[in-house]
Structures are given as C-alpha cells and as structure tokens.
C-alpha cells in the first residue's frame, strides 16, 4: 500500500425473507468519499459490510447519511443482541 486506507466494518444479520430487498437497496446507496465497498457473507444470513474511504474526515462527514441508511434497512435485519441492536461495528 502506498497510502493509508480508512475503513469501517459493520457486522449484521438479515432476516431470511429480506436478503434480496436489502441488496436492492444497498445497490442504490452511495456515500460521498467512499471509494470501495464490500459485503462478505459470513454465515447463512450473516454479513460484514466493509467501506473503504478517502479519509477519516470523509467517514465522519457521512455518519448522518449512514445512520439514515441504517434506519432505512433496520427492519430487514435481525437483532444481534439487546445491547448491540441490529449492527455491530467491528
């Protein structure tokens, strides 16, 4: 690597009947300053979202947009635990 990368990683679990709907929504979602994104399937309905960003400032400036996105897809996700809710930043 020639330059530092800034990333966020979030673990979540989709409801079985909501997988297709989630991916339709995420395909239409873009955050300014995010240069790449990956979603790794880690179990039957378990996933990790990885976002690669231009800078730490880009991540910080897009937090409100990321919260709005989470509010849009929250109903498609299973609760991980009462303490975490539906996502776990890792």
Image (tube, rainbow, N blue to C red):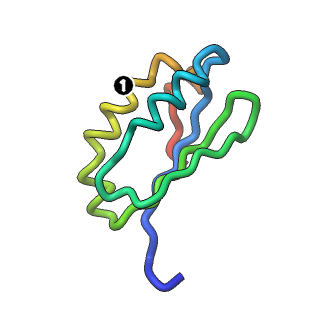
Q: Quadrant of residue 33?
A: bottom left
Q: Position of residue 73 (x, y in %)?
A: 44, 24
Q: Position of residue 17 (x, y in %)?
A: 63, 14
For the image, the number of numbered tags is 1
Query: Where 59 falls versus 11 (above or below)?
Result: below
Please tell me whether mark 1 sits on a helix, a strand or a loop: helix
Asked whether, in this view, residue 55 is left or right of residue 80, the answer is left
Query: Where 5 falls versus 32 (above or below)?
Result: below
Which residue is pictured at 24% across the width and 52% down the height? 61
Query: Where 38 falls versus 87 (above or below)?
Result: below
Query: Where 5 falls versus 1 (above or below)?
Result: above
Which residue in the protein does label 1 denote? 71
Which residue is pictured at 50% across the width and 52% down the height? 37
Asked whether, in this view, residue 18 is left or right of residue 27, the answer is right
Q: Position of residue 58 (x, y in %)?
A: 29, 59
Which quadrant of the figure contains the N terminus? bottom right
Which residue is pictured at 54% across the width and 45% down the height? 49
Q: Quadrant of residue 20?
A: top right
Q: Residues within 10 Å of mark 1 (few under 14, many from 20)?
A: few
Which residue is pictured at 33% across the width and 64% down the height? 56
Foreground residue, 79 or 15?
Answer: 15
Q: Position of residue 22 (x, y in %)?
A: 52, 26
Asked whether, in this view, residue 84 is left or right of residue 70, the answer is right
In the rendered image, the residue lying farthest to the bottom is 2
């Amino acid at each position: 690597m020639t330059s530092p990368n800034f990333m966020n990683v979030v673990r979540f679990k989709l409801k079985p009947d909501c997988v297709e709907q989630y991916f339709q929504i995420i395909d239409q979602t873009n955050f300014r300053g995010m240069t790449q994104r990956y979603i790794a399937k880690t179990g039957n309905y378990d996933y990790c979202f990885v976002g690669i960003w231009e800078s730490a400032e880009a991540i910080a400036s897009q937090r409100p947009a990321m919260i709005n996105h989470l509010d849009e897809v929250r109903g498609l996700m299973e609760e991980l635990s009462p303490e975490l809710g539906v996502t776990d930043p890792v």
